[in-house]
Image: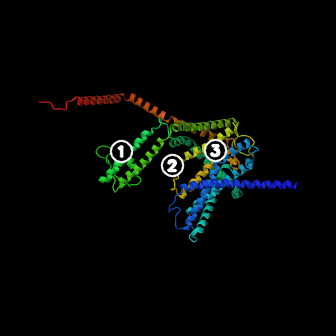
Amino acid sequence: MDDEEADLREQIFHNNVREQIIFLLLFILLYLFSFMLIEKFRRRDSEDYFTADEDEVKVYRISLWLCTFALAVSLGSALLLPVSIVSNEVLILYPNSYYVKWLNSSLIQGLWNHVFLFSNLSLFVFLPFAYLFSESTGFPGCRGLRGRVYETFIVLFLLGIGMLGLAYVISAWLKGDRSGIDALLNLWTYLPFLYSCVSFVGVLMLLVFTPLGFVRLFGVVGAVLVKPQFLRDLNEEYYVYSLEEATIRRRIDNSAATGASYITPEPMCPGRGDISASVDDSVSDSKAKIVEPDEKQIPLLRLRNGALHAGLNERLHRIVAMRKEVENKRKTSSLQRNVVYPLAMLLLLALTAITVLMVLQNTLELLIGIKALPLSTRQFTLGIASLSKLGWAGATLEAFLILYLHAASLTGLCTPMRALRVLPRARRTPLTRIIALCAVLLAHSTAQPLLVKILGITNFDLLGEFGRIEWLGSFKLVLLYNAIFASTASLCLINKFTASVRRELYNRFKWITDLFTAPETQLHRISNTSRLSMDWSVNEKTETNSDPKPKSQ
């Protein structure tokens, strides 16, 4: 009996060690990938990293490591559900395989618990510490790295007290709790509540950006892949860029030879503002002057101090880059243009339609009472039954849909970030912006499992503390969320594919109404046009038939 208990304890010990090693290896892989991603975008100049002060270098490195940790946790949170679904199907397909015995419910449960714990630490401790540490200067009596650490911890402590007090007020207001000081001092009850509030904000953010990302993905794929010939004439674009390149080269040679400070010859399409757009960033208003010659509303740039030559060179570099890009796309095979692009568009349309149909089905099941709320209280065992009625094929489709939702929400999130000019740029992103982007991505990724479960994309229960978030048990909230998501996604798709048709119908209807509301004006325009054309034809015929020799007197 003692030998059996010893063997059981030894087996539990080995299983625990194996799980910890697997967690460590997964985290190292995610951390290395996150580090390479941040290294691609972080700024490398004297203001951020290369400085003579060793304390500044240490502060920068510590803050960068904390950002990398938070980004690794966000990647792990985004992969939680797909990995769990695939693991369940693998255990069902190969129940007795020696190579998958390490994959069990304890491992997946521990993975969810670790992600939840590290998400809380990153949101409420590591990222605020990284920002405050990078912006700290130290107390007057204690300079150096130690003073900055003291200042950061004190400010973080005061911020934590304020956040806990705010959480206590919000909790008492929502729950109607009139308890005294004992509930206020029970800090561990407010940490999950704070995370619940952050996850709710993340889910609302996904509700806005995911339907927008469905539409934006079509444009992104259309920009990456080469469209067929009937949708995009690459030969015409190539000739246009070639002619514009030749024109700009002649203008550069002319300005270098004559020293002129104005564009010669005059642009044929000056309203486009090609040159003004190219030199707007590099030339101040004092060096640029817009002149309106004669009665023509044609802006001509008269630039001094070599600004015209610099602006033309910058425009030339852009045109050459676009011409080379179009030239490379011209070399794409017809098979790729006529097969890959339509298949990619059909795949995006099919994934979006399947997602909307599954959300509608989940809404109806919630109304009828067939499906339960996403609040999970039971213990899930991996490898017992398939999560989909279609078996491994349906589970694979669910995993792809989850990744597609994540990609769509990220694409939709890039739209306001691009408008606010906070998107990361390669080797030009400062540390404070990296910290803010890591916080946004972490809130976005940790809310992704909640979004998938609310919409009913999968039947996999939320494990750990993810399934115990209280607002997931609100029937009205979940039902309203499903209805809003289905309606907004459908409206975005309808607007995407019918915009051109509706615009053309509107133009035709407007033309017809103008024709009937002002018939005299329309007839007057038509008569004037016909009279001008007749006069032009008569004059042309007269000039053709006229004798070039002078008549004799």
Mark closer to the observer (1, 3) = 1
Which comes before the other along the chain, label 2 or label 3? 2
Q: Is residue 123 visible?
A: no
Q: Measured from the top left, where is residue 539 in percent x and y?
A: 25, 30
* Quadrant position of the N terminus in the picture: bottom right
Dot 1 falls on a residue whose secondary structure is helix
Alpha-carbon span between mark 1 and mark 2: 28 Å
Residue 506 is marked as none
Q: Residues within 10 Å of mark 3 (few under 14, many from 20)?
A: many
* Among numbered discs 1 and 2, the one appearing first in the sequence: 1
Q: Which residue is mark 1?
A: 270
Res 371 → quadrant: top right
Amino acid type, mark 3:
Leu
Residue 210 image-quadrant placement: top right
Q: Amino acid at mark 2?
A: Arg
In the rendered image, which residue does mark 3 sit on? 451
Which marked residue is nearer to the observer: mark 1 or mark 2?
1
Q: Is residue 396 left or right of residue 297?
A: right
Does 379 appear above or below 68?
above
Q: Which mark is residue 418?
A: 2
- Measured along the vertical axis of the image, is residue 308 above or below residue 512? below
Left or right: 265 with respect to 323? Answer: left
Give the answer, above or below, for where 208 lies relative to 125.
above
Instruction: Name the image quarter holding the C terminus.
Output: top left
